[in-house]
Structure formats: C-alpha cells, structure tokens
Amino acid sequence: MSVWHGDSHKKKPSGGRKRAYRKKRKFEQGSFPAETILGETKRRIKRKKGGNLKTKILKDKYACVTDSKSGKTEKVEIRRVLKNPVNVDYDRRGVITKGAIIETPKGLAKVTSRPGQHGIINAILISEEK
C-alpha cells in the first residue's frame, strides 16, 4: 500500500459525483513518514523524482546543536525527547520531528530541521527561562 497525493476528489461543488478520468500516476505517489526515534543511527536512502536522492533518518542519537549567542555549532548526544507539539502520540513515543524539544548535555534545544526529509537533526539551544 502506498500514499497517494492525487487530486481526484469524489464530489463536484454541486454535490454530484465525479468519475475518475484516469488511473493513479507514479508522480502522485507519496511515502509514509519516517518517524525518527532515538537509537543507533539508521538511515534510508530513496530515489526521488528527477533521479534525486532523499535521506530519511529512522533512528539517531546525535544532533547538531547551535548556540545562537556564540554562533558555534557542536555535534552532541540527545539524552531524550522532552516534548513534541506536533502530535500527542509522537510526544509519548519520543518521535523527533521539526519543533520537537530535545534534552542535550548543553541544555534544551528545539529541532529546526526535518529529520525524515533532510537526513540530519539540527537544533538551536533555547533559553532555560521558558
């Protein structure tokens, strides 16, 4: 089973039924989310449209954390996922997506990259006041 991003809606604005005028196309095909979690590094490389490659991180335990005050970036270990505002279920399971708050030895950091799309976990340190 695959994810389909076609634009064939079932009803007309008037409420009438629309008939399919063609079958599904390869370029309309999507994919399931990577749902990155903590663990030993595990990646999937998929061929995409135009011969391009997309790296999906399935598991990783390191993040590139940037300190916005000093402007320095370091690769640090992720201790745990504190919060994921995207989805309550992701929050419970510890899935890392863009916007997730992670705990590192340098402090709390907010993920700014999309691990399932970009193939890397980038984060920015957030102030301890919040």
Image: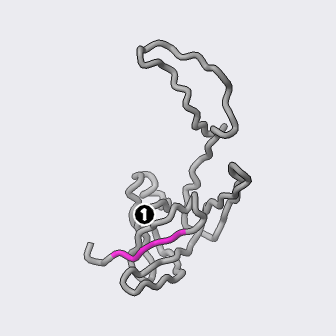
Main SS of the magenta segment? strand
- Say which amino acid is labelled 1: Ala
Spot occupied by residue 50 in the image (x, y as percentages of width and height) = 71, 51
Does residue 88 appear to the left or right of 3 in the view shown? left
For the point 68% across and 34% down, the residue is 25
Residue located farthest toward the front when viewing the structure as drawn: 50
Q: Check the picture and name the quadrant holding the C terminus.
A: bottom left
For the point 57% across and 68% down, the residue is 120
Spot occupied by residue 42 in the image (x, y as percentages of width and height) = 66, 65
Q: Check the picture and name the quadrant holding the N terminus.
A: top right
Confirm whether the magenta stretch covers residue 125: yes
Q: Which residue is mark 1?
A: 100
Residue located farthest toward the left when viewing the structure as drawn: 129
Residue 116, by quadrant, is: bottom right
Picture layout, residue 127 above or below residue 101: below
- How many callouts does the rendering have? 1
Instruction: Count residues near mark 1 (Cα–Cα under 10 Å), then give few for <14, some for 14-19, many for 20+.
Output: many
Q: Which residues are magenta?
A: 121-126
For the point 55% across and 67% down, the residue is 38
Does residue 44 appear to the left or right of 88 in the view shown? right
Confirm whether the magenta stretch covers residue 3: no
Residue located farthest toward the top when viewing the structure as drawn: 16
